[in-house]
Image (spheres, rainbow, N blue to C red):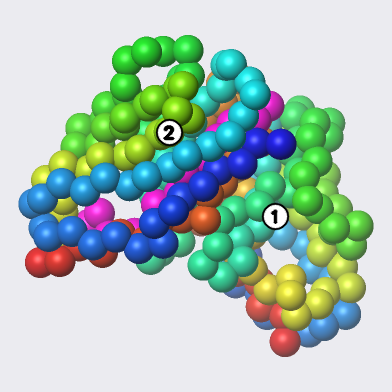
Amino acid sequence: DSGVTQTPKHLITATGQRVTLRCSPRSGDLSVYWYQQSLDQGLQFLIQYYNGEERAKGNILERFSAQQFPDLHSELNLSSLELGDSALYFCASSASGNIQYFGAGTRLSVL
Amino acid sequence: AQTVTQSQPEMSVQEAETVTLSCTYDTSESDYYLFWYKQPPSRQMILVIRQEAYKQQNATENRFSVNFQKAAKSFSLKISDSQLGDAAMYFCAYDSNYQLIWGAGTKLIIKP
């Protein structure tokens, strides 16, 4: 168990809808990262937050947004969903070092 | 921009034998970190090993070791005494300002 909690584990929704994925980092970790993994591919970095502030942004679509709350949990919001958004979404957290610990992921299926 | 390449989509090894997974990367930075992560069928991403570029010594974690060739920008993973539980996708990743850049992965099959 990495200590990073992601909910829900699975999400099935329809095109055009909006969903929210939630991540609770390991206790004490200030950084949260979001990644997208499409079927049998490597991970694509989406966005990073550090202590509530956006620190880095990767290949995140404008339809996607994220935030980190004062209690350090983070949410990834995906809107106007398309079939191609179906993927595994990972959250990771890290302390001051650079080792990222990953949650179990949320599998999103857009039908 | 940094890139990570894993040229072996799939590898297989007999149980108890040794296998080496390849990874090359491209960067203009001199100080960075490299990682190998394992993704078993459960889909959990598990850190296998980390290498700091400024350290000459290759990292080792039990049966897992790396061959880090900085000049060649090569970072291979050696798994000794392969076990059935080692079957998984293995991803090489480069740390670029706390963003991980990932290779496409190598599927490792263990033959009993």
x 18%, y 59%: residue: B13
Judged left or right of residue A40, residue B98 is right
Q: Which residue is mark 1?
A: A22
**Amino acid on which the number 2 mark rests in the picture:** Ser
Say if A27 sits above or below A83 in the image: above
**Local SS, label 2:** strand
Q: Main secondary structure of the magenta part?
A: strand
Q: Is residue A11 magenta?
A: no
Q: Mark 1: which secondary structure?
A: strand
Task: Name the foreground residue: B37 vs B30.
Answer: B30
Measured in 3D between alpha carbons, the distance from the residue under mark 1 to the one under mark 2, in whole angstroms, is 36 Å
Q: Is residue A98 visible?
A: yes
Residue under the image location 41 percent in, 62 percent down: B9
**Residue under disc 1 on the same chain as residue under disc 2:** no
Q: Amino acid at mark 1?
A: Arg
* B88 in the magenta segment: yes
The residue under the point 61% across, 66% down is A38
Q: Position of residue B78 (x, y in %)?
A: 25, 40
Vertical position of residue B52 compared to residue A7: above or below? above
Percent x, y for residue B60? Answer: 27, 27
- Is residue B44 at all visible to an observer of this figure? no
Taking depth in this image into account, of A64 and B52 the one nearest to the observer is: B52
What residue span does the magenta drawing correspond to?
B85-97
Q: Pointer 1 indicates a residue of which chain? A: A
| Viewer-closest of B54 and A6 | B54
Picture quarter with the C terminus of chain A: bottom right
Q: Chain of mark 2?
A: B
Mark 2 lies on residue: B74
- Residue B14 in percent (x, y) is at 12, 60
